[in-house]
Amino acid sequence: MTCEHLEKATDAVPASPYQAGCPECVPAGFRDWVHLRVCLECGYVGCCDSSPRRHMSRHHEQTGHPVMRSYEPGEKWRWCFVDEVLGP
């Protein structure tokens, strides 16, 4: 199953390097982020919903950007927030 958002989404250039961690958690002194995600609309990098501050979900809520993908090494799956669909 897919949706129009996943079909239209293309990779964005990440706005933050993976090695630095979550770009919002780390400067605030938090090191408890779990996994990183990247917004395919603008390249924003934020922590996942398993992380205490859920920065990627907050980014979607604030911007309406529909699709993100895993920013973990070796993972390429994507998620549409609007339709709640997982895609390749």
Image: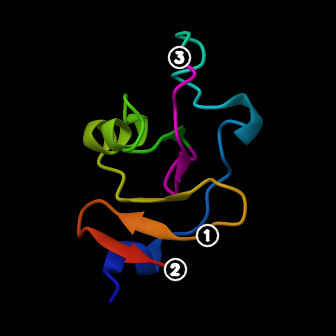
Q: Earlier in the sequence, mark 1 or mark 2?
A: 1
Tag 1: amino acid: Lys
Identify which residue, 10 or 53, lies in the foreground: 53
Q: Residue at x 37, y 30 (%)?
A: 52
Is residue 41 shown above or below 44?
below
Q: Magenta stretch mostly in which secondary structure?
A: loop
Residues shaded magenta: 30-43
Q: Earlier in the sequence, mark 3 or mark 1?
A: 3
Q: CA distance from mark 3 to mark 1?
A: 26 Å
Camera-side mark, 3 or 1 = 3
Q: Does the CB distance between marks 2 and 3 fall below 8 Å? A: no
Please give the residue where the numbered disc 2 appears in the rendered image. Answer: 88
Tag 3: amino acid: Phe
Estimate the x, y position of residue 13 in percent, counting from the top left: 68, 51
Please give the residue where the numbered disc 1 appears in the rendered image. Answer: 76
Tag 2: amino acid: Pro
